[in-house]
Image: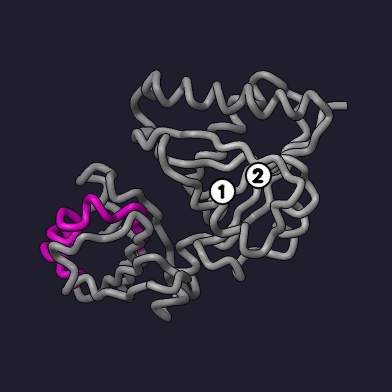
């Protein structure tokens, strides 16, 4: 029988924020497929779990996923599609051997996770694939708690956007929603700050860098222009 595949959210970075279920699954499976964004780099997800999960007698297989953008309105690059297909083939090889395997992914697997693309390719090849997603604490939750900011209250509405989103859509969200969360803010910081200033929202925004980690920072947006932020940075704009 083909083995079961688990996609496991490992949280925003602090190992002690893994859920009990995540740890149980990661401890049980004999094979871990760990993602990395650079071919010569290491897996951040693996560095999170190795402090709380023993890797003894486990087979750890690295999967390289290029950091190219995946946009909703344009075709994905051949490089990225090839990486997805190669990763799916590696996973299926182990599942077809009857082994259970897990793919640890940062944050929660339902938020901007590479794991979803991998699962998409797997289920296209194997429609009856036995797969399970284990939720994790997202960077949004971690950032809000670190900054002590409520994301939404009562009947408020929230929008979650990648900072790479087109300018018109960003302005529309900021004008229409009570809270707007920007993910992957590091490369588009100054552009977003300019828009916030024009909409007089600069003082209502906060940035959390490396939430839950030892070197986390909380930065008022009004003091953030020109900063070289880490990739793990999230901005919360709360209008109320």
Q: Secondary structure at mark 1?
A: strand
Mark closer to the chain start, 2 or 1: 2
Q: Residue at x 73, y 45 (%)?
A: 58
Q: Is residue 26 among what the camera can see?
A: yes
**In the figure, 52 relative to 59: above or below?**
below
Residue 109 is situated, as x and y percent measured from the top left of the image, at 57, 48
In front: 136, or 1? 1
Residue 44 is situated, as x and y percent measured from the top left of the image, at 49, 52
Quarter-of-image position of residue 215: bottom left
Residue 4 is situated, as x and y percent measured from the top left of the image, at 79, 36
Magenta range is: 180-202
Distance from label 2 to label 1 (Cα)? Answer: 7 Å
- The reply to whether dot 2 and dot 1 touch (C-beta < 8 Å) is yes
Residue at mark 2: 7
Badge 2 density bin: few <14, some 14–19, many ≥20, Cα 10 Å: many
**In the figure, 193 relative to 212: above or below?**
above
Does residue 186 show up magenta in the picture?
yes
**In the figure, 86 relative to 50: above or below?**
above
Q: Is residue 199 among what the camera can see?
A: no
Does residue 198 show up magenta in the picture?
yes
Residue at mark 1: 105
Q: Residue at x 14, y 65 (%)?
A: 225
In front: 185, or 168? 185
**Quadrant (top left/top right/bottom left/bottom right) for the N terminus:** top right
**Quadrant (top left/top right/bottom left/bottom right) for the C terminus:** bottom left
């Amino acid at each position: 029988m083909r083995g079961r595949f688990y996609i496991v959210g490992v949280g925003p970075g602090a190992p002690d924020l893994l859920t009990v279920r995540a740890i149980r699954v990661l401890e049980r499976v004999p094979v871990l497929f760990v993602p990395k964004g650079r071919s010569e780099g290491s897996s951040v997800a693996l560095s999170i779990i190795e402090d709380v999960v023993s890797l003894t007698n486990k087979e750890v297989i690295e999967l390289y996923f290029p950091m190219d953008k995946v946009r909703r309105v344009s075709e994905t690059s051949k490089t990225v599609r090839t990486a997805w297909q190669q990763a799916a083939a590696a996973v299926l090889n182990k599942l077809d051997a009857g082994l259970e395997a897990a793919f640890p992914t940062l944050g929660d697997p339902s938020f901007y996770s590479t794991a979803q693309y991998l699962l998409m390719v797997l289920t296209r090849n194997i429609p009856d694939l036995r797969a399970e997603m284990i939720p994790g604490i997202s960077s949004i939750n971690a950032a809000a708690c670190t900054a002590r900011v409520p994301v939404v209250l009562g009947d408020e509405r929230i929008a979650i956007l990648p900072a790479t989103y087109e300018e018109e859509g960003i302005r529309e969200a900021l004008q229409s929603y009570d809270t707007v969360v920007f993910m992957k803010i590091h490369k588009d910081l100054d552009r977003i700050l300019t828009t916030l200033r024009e909409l007089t929202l600069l003082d209502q925004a906060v940035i959390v860098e490396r939430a839950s980690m030892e070197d986390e920072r909380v930065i008022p947006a009004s003091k953030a222009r020109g900063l070289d932020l880490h990739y793990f940075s999230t901005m919360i704009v709360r209008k109320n």
